[in-house]
Image (cartoon, rainbow, N blue to C red):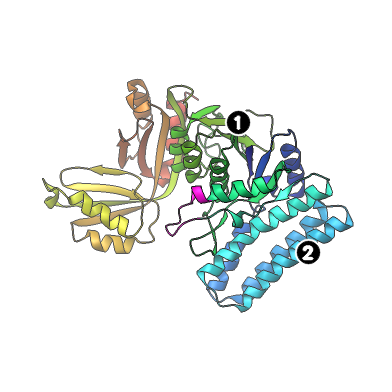
Amino acid sequence: MKIMKFGGTSVGKPQRMYDVARLITKDSEPKIVVLSAVSGTTNSLVEIANLLAAQKREEAKEKIDVLEAKYQEFIKELVQKEDAYAQAKAIIQEHFEFLNIILKISYSEALSKDILAQGELISTKLFSVYLGEQGIDHMLLPALNFMSIDENDEPQVAAISEKLKAQVAQNSSKNLFITQGYICRNAKGEVDNLKRGGSDYSASLIAAAINASVCEIWTDIDGMHNNDPRVVNKTQPIEQLSFDEAAELAYFGAKILHPASIWPAQQYNVPVKLLNTMEPEAKGTTITSEAASKGVKAVAAKDGITAVNIKSSRMLLAYGFLRKVFEIFEKYRTPIDMITTSEVAVSVTIDTDAALPSIRKELEALGSVDTENDMTIVSIVGNEIAHNTETLQDVFNSLTGVDVRMISYGGSPHNISILVPAAQKKEVLQKINSGVFKL
């Protein structure tokens, strides 16, 4: 059984849904199709939830009406037969009645998760109506019946597997299942989600849970490129990456793949393919346990970084100092991306400053603290590049004139990361494209 995941742009218009239907029926292999919300929907739902949280109910109502009008137009083009249109209209009515009812309910964090779930629920139900109109045999498999996370927001792969396999077995006559990405239930049984970009994560978890032959991630780009095509000209798609290389790239900013989505596939050795809905014949990128070759494969940039520098003469020969620093970040559930140390100072980077005031206050008990905002981590990724002196020379020669604030080298054989001011990001990516890829 294969898993096929389609993102928001891949289902963003009726014509795109037609394309998806053609792709999922090209062969007879049993498959589970994971869909995101129609493009733009989740952003609208986030705005609605934020307005409700701010007690701006009239503005929230306006947003709901605009979104509903969009879907009313969507279904007019999606289906042609009267009975299919009636089904689609009933789906829109059901979900927008819910959104209008919540205008009268006290806002809560749990309610916001219900609001955000509406996008995937609507897209999968409408797609199911279209498949039914076309006479394509399938079954809608609600993700809320099997996808779950624990009290630490971690997916429960064993439980997901047990529930999912049972549901598939109960419907063994079906070869095609449609389900939602992103949404799940939490430890309390409430509707929750796998955070933004979580449809990739859903697909990978489902692939692991069902022991899939492959997990295909379909987007609007022909695979992962060796640099950011929005910033740099002459980028090239990468045909093959190892799980380790892909994980580094996803974590450090490659937008085509959600950072968490590599882990389940890697743990259960399920190949991942990144494919283009608009160019289905393109090779895309295949991710497996094996790297195709040594050398630099790609560069990724992660924005919104804050550097935190702690300086203290008490660090000199003091064991336990780093533990105290890390415990403060752990206390506030703030992950660290990069770290450098000297005899009297330690510098780390974080990608969220939500808890920074509290973190800084506690760090000041250990020494003087200063922070730098609006930074970018640029990561050069490839199989064992940290052991290749020629690659290292190319990388560092490319950085002439760049204000490098931190370097992370040696922690991973596949990654060299540098911290630069965000204002120099474009320049750095272009210089590496010329100096390392010779493009």
Q: Which residues are magenta?
A: 149-159
> In front: 187, or 330?
187
Q: Which residue is mark 1?
A: 284
Residue 38 at x, y = what percent? Answer: 67, 53
Whether the magenta-drawn stretch holds residue 152 is answered as: yes
Q: Which residue is mark 2?
A: 90
Amino acid type of disc 2?
Answer: Ala
Q: Residues within 10 Å of mark 2 (few under 14, many from 20)?
A: few
Query: Mark 2 or mark 1, which has the lower sequence index?
Result: 2
167 displayed left or right of 148 = right
SS label for mark 1: loop
Depicted 235 relative to depicted 146: above or below: above
Principal SS element in the magenta part? loop
Depicted 328 relative to depicted 418: above or below: below
Identified at 12% across, 48% down, the residue is 318
Residue 401 at x, y = what percent? Answer: 35, 35
Which corner quadrant holds the N terminus? top right
